[in-house]
Amino acid sequence: MDAKPKRSHLAERSRGVLPPDELQHFLDTFLYREEAVLVDEITSVDRTERRIEALLDTERPLPFAAAQRVSPNHPAHVSGAELVMVTGALGCLHAWLFHGCRWDQGWAGFGNRIHRADFKRLARLGPPVVLVSSETRTRVGPSRAVIRFDFEFRQDGELVYVGDQSAMFVRNRALDGE
């Protein structure tokens, strides 16, 4: 008898919001391996408002946070690079959930502009970071989608990051300049 494929932690934790098989398909075909997604649970999806709320578990290993040399003057924290990387994962979730961009159907996505990135305070290791992403503008066609996003990340109710960023998603077309 074939063993049922194991579902990811993200798919299992988000099962009350999204069908686990759909989210697992996103992860299995995504442009990055799961450890680079940095989203640990999706807590809300509003298809009408094109808004996603999620959590980043800061107690799990994070690639740059794990490499920090911690001191009284440099406390352990989620690095800015990790916060920006999670914006990319959220943007790709928007493209997948709201615009039908499927990685296994030839779609790829690229962040193409950070209009604003404000790091309001350190995101400490320990408490989760609440991630909120909303679309502010979209241009969507059969083989291209350009989406602009607002991001607000909070920890213990305090704002840690605000972003205004754009990404482009294309189907069956390389964006490497050739």
Image (cartoon, grey):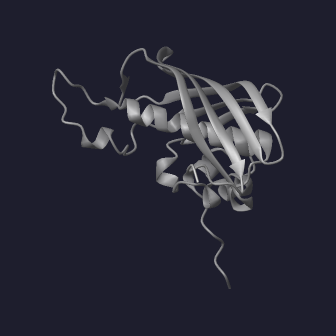
Residue placed at 21% from the left, 25% from the top? 74
Q: Looking at the image, which is closer to me, 97 or 22?
A: 97
Residue 164 shows up from this direction: yes
Q: Is residue 106 above or below residue 67?
A: below
Horizontal and vertical percent for residue 146?
A: 71, 35
Q: Residue furthest front?
A: 178
The residue sitting at 47% across, 30% down in the picture is 128
Where's the C terminus, which quadrant?
bottom right
Looking at the picture, does residue 163 appear above or below residue 21? above
The x, y position of residue 109, in whole percent, is: 63, 46
Number of labelled discs? 0
Residue 31 horizontal/vertical position (percent): 58, 54
Q: Is residue 60 left or right of residue 139?
A: left
Question: Relative to the observer, which residue lies in front, 170 or 39?
Answer: 170
Residue 177, percent from left and from top:
57, 49
- Would residue 120 appear left or right of 21 to someone viewing this image? left
Answer with the quarter of the image where residue 39 lies. Answer: top right
Q: Is residue 16 visible?
A: no
Rendered-image quadrant of the N terminus = bottom right
**In the rendered image, the vertical position of residue 86 relative to residue 32, given as above or below:** above
- As drawn, is 157 to the left or to the right of 53? left
Q: From the viewer's perspective, is residue 89 above or below residue 133?
A: below
Tell me which corner region of the image, top left, top right, bottom left or bottom right, holds residue 7.
Answer: bottom right
Residue at left offset 75%, top offset 50%: 19
